[in-house]
Image (spheres, rainbow, N blue to C red):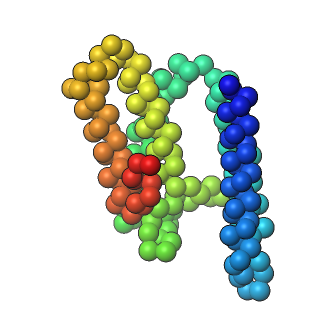
Amino acid sequence: ETRLAGMVTAGLVVFGIAAKYGGGSLVTVKGQNVGIGFAGRQLVGALIGGALLLLASRQDYYRWRRAAWPLLLLTIVFLLIPLLPFTRPISPSLNGARRWVVLGRLNFQPSELARLAVVNWCAMLASKKGTQIRDFKRCGLPIILIQGLVALLILLEPNLSMATPG
């Protein structure tokens, strides 16, 4: 089952890189085709993500449970950076939206980190509550509040595709 999931994931990654190349090959900037550049960046991201996935899968999951609150709070700080007016040097406006945080050579969308942080935090809460998971006040309401706060911060960037489920 794990091997099948890995093969399906790898197939989807290859398909995504090919689609990125195909779509980018239709675009030329200053007389040069940009498809190979798009596909190359996608491939580098896939390789880094795959390495991080292997590293994370080898970790004791209790570490992720302990990291849930710090990771969530760090994510909220990063989500606030594009919203604050004095952070323009590290969060420039691109195409009318401030979604990116640039820290030296590292640039990323905090909404991507939010995916991991919210899922990890919800898993921590569910495992901590155990049989109380069916109690709306003890488990459902906190999950709705945290997801709502993170979604609101993402919507304010604006980043509608990341803030909506699906």
Question: Considering only vertical position in the picture, is 73 above or below 80?
Answer: above
Q: Please state which of residues 132 and 153 is positioned toward the viewer in this rendering.
A: 132
How many badges with numbers are in the image?
A: 0
Residue at (41, 48) in percent of width and height: 165
Front residue (pair 135, 73)? 135
- Which residue sits at x=63%, y=23%? 59
Residue closest to the far left: 137
**Residue 117 place in picture, x, y as percent:** 47, 38
Residue 157 visible from this viewpoint: no
Q: Quadrant of residue 15?
A: bottom right
Relative to 152, 25 lies left or right: right
**Which quarter of the rendering shows the N terminus?**
top right
**Percent from the top left, x then y, of residue 5?**
67, 33
Q: Determine whether 131 is above or below 82 in the image.
A: above
Q: In the rendered view, would you say 118 is above or below 66?
A: below
The residue furthest top is 131
Left or right? Give the position of 99 relative to 38.
left
Residue in view at x 45 percent, y 66 percent: 98
The structure residue drawn at horizontal position 28% and vertical position 21%, both measured from the top left corner, is: 134
Q: Is residue 117 visible?
A: yes
Q: Quarter of the image holding residue 75?
A: top left
Q: Where does residue 164 sit, x and y in percent of width and height? A: 39, 52
